[in-house]
Amino acid sequence: MEAQNPGRGQKELREWVQTARLCTGCGACVGLCPYQVVYRDQTIILNDCDLPEGRCYAFCPRTPTDYDELRKTLFDPADLTPELGPFRGFYITRAADPEIRKKAQHGGTVTALMSLALTQGLIDTAIVAEGQTDLQQRGLTVHTLDEIQGHGKSRFLVSPTVAEFNKAVQGEAQRIGVVATPCQAQALAKMRLKPIPTNDNHIDKLHLVIGLFCGWTLSWRPFSELLRSHTDLSDIIGMDIPAGKGVVEIRTRRGILTFTMDELAPHIREGCRYCLDSTAEFADLSVGSARLPADWEETRTWNQVIVRSKAGEELLGLARSLGVLEFREVPPGNLEDLKKAAWEKKQTAKERIREKGRSTGPLVYAKVE
């Protein structure tokens, strides 16, 4: 497959992504040169670059891309589905170790799989998200089980994880695994095409991508201001979206704060409104919170997992054989419900992309019929 974005660089990135408010904050354009940096949850261009062809543009998940062709290039075409992308299997799992589950967002499947990949030598380095002061997020390079298992919570805010990958590949790491949201997995997929042949982007060091289901992320500034009106940010110890309740729970040391989706909708990042992918289709394995007929306290201890690649299939099989993960039967209708939700998100995003294209011209990132 030929490079999809030849002969374009920072100028087009600024116009077609940042000015158009399509930036996801994934960090793919950061760490490649001194000109782009992350400040809080925003990607900032510090200086103009006159290179006619730039990695910043080529790797961005919001520069024009034929994602159908990208899927066919990177995955077995026989595995492709219209709703979920590459699909080799669907499971309900959780970490067998209760201590991992206690530290994780839900069932601890991501932590358990990354830990297994590290101990088995499938990777020597993992890139994860880390929470900082005032809820800000950053990517973090880790090498030990303790480090991996200490970063299993979600804050529903963007982490520039790919920027950390760009940094890690320049070091001694040889086999890197990344925990990625859908847009971050898209950026890594575009890197795999090696769109600028004269540049060595070290993408061959990427050996595993575990994707996270994601419907949206929140903009740090307005969201943090909303929370500050109710609590001190340092008191926040966790966040969750209980299945079927239509609310976000903010767990603090003083109790639980509850916000409806209507209250949070104005704070969703603009770039997330145009995302076609809710299940991280360009990962080896994709993991989200389970949907079970049990009560929420039981449901929140399990994950749903999509296997997408041979590497993902082998890792999940190893986790089963070694007892690293527990498996339970998939409830009837679960997969169909997931397909429906993913398809509806695609259709909503497509319509928003069409509307944006009508107002801005051909400056939207995805090929939409």
Image (cartoon, rainbow, N blue to C red):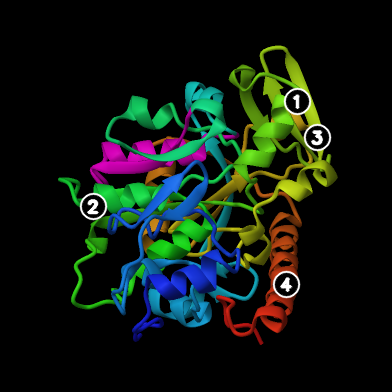
Magenta span has 121? Answer: yes
If the image is split into quadrants, where does the C terminus sit? Answer: bottom right
Kindly check if marks 4 and 1 are in contact, taking CB atoms under 8 A apart as contact: no
Q: Dot 3 surroundings within 10 Å: few (below 14), some, or many (20 or more)?
A: some
What residue is drawn where x is 75% and y is 67%? 344
- Nearer to the camera, 346 or 11: 11
Write the start and end of the magenta stretch as one range: 106-132
User: Marks 4/1: CA distance?
Assistant: 32 Å
Q: Earlier in the sequence, mark 2 or mark 3?
A: 2
User: Marks 1/3: CA distance?
Assistant: 13 Å
State whether residue 362 is above or below residue 57. Answer: below
Question: In what element is the residue under mark 3?
Answer: strand
User: Marks 2/3: CA distance?
Assistant: 40 Å
What residue is drawn where x is 29% and y is 39%? 118
User: Marks 2/4: CA distance?
Assistant: 35 Å
- Read off the residue under disc 1: 229
Q: Amino acid at mark 3?
A: Phe
User: Marks 3/4: CA distance?
Assistant: 25 Å
- Read off the residue under disc 3: 259
- Read off the residue under disc 2: 169
